[in-house]
Image: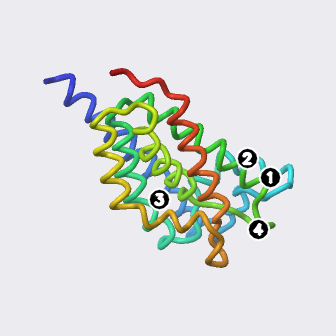
Amino acid sequence: MKEVFGEIRTQILILATLVGLMWGLEILDVFVFRTGLDIFGILPRNVIGLRGILFAPFLHGGFGHLAANTVPFIVLGWLIMAQGISDFVIVSVICMVVVGLGTWLFGAPALHIGASGVIFGYVGFLLARYYFDRRISSGIIALIVGCSYGSVLWGIFPSTPGISWEGHLFGFIGGIIAARLIKFSP
């Protein structure tokens, strides 16, 4: 029982640290740098824009943008982490790389920032995981995620100017890739 609480405490600490980093950076960006940190986002087909692969998920276009990403990041991130902290790390890294490279290669010529690409990756992973592992628990989670977040999948199509549908699309693809690569134990 002590192990379970220790694991949950670690999961909370990891998620709180990542969300705290996002919020701390946005506070600094708005009040100290006057949105100057946003230049560290992904700038497609520009060598300097490659740094955004690492930085873009932690940068946001204002507090509304960050608030919209915070709850899904925590909920979906924890659903992945419930399988194992290592799964969360692997899925997050794969999604960041696929989002970053895909957006850098194919994105519109604008600055791309925000955690939504990674969040779409989490959705893709949680939906695809059942296809690859066929466990009832994964199916139930996929059903819950599909019902709760399925409508956001429209975000992988170009619709709203200023929103990186490319990041959403490549995030979703990254999540599916992660689901395929992770070996699930019965």
What residue is at 44 percent from the left and 28 percent from the top?
Answer: 86
Mark number displayed over residue 110 = 4
Nearest-to-viewer mark from 3 and 1? 1
Find the distance from the CA under tag 3 to the CA under tag 1: 28 Å
Mark closest to the chain's N terminus, 4 or 1:
1
Residue underneath mark 1: 105
Mark number displayed over residue 23 = 3
Quadrant where the C terminus lies? top left
Q: Are marks 2 and 1 in contact (CB under 8 Å)?
A: yes
Nearest-to-viewer mark from 4 and 2? 2
Residue 43 vs residue 98, the one in the foreground: 98
Mark closest to the chain's N terminus, 3 or 1:
3
Find the distance from the CA under tag 4 to the CA under tag 1: 12 Å
- Give coordinates of residue 14: x percent, y percent: 39, 39
Q: Is residue 15 above or below residue 25?
A: above
Q: Residues within 10 Å of mark 1 (few under 14, many from 20)?
A: some
Q: Are marks 4 and 2 in contact (CB under 8 Å)?
A: no
Label 4 secondary element = loop
Label 3 secondary element = helix
Q: Residues within 10 Å of mark 2 (few under 14, many from 20)?
A: many
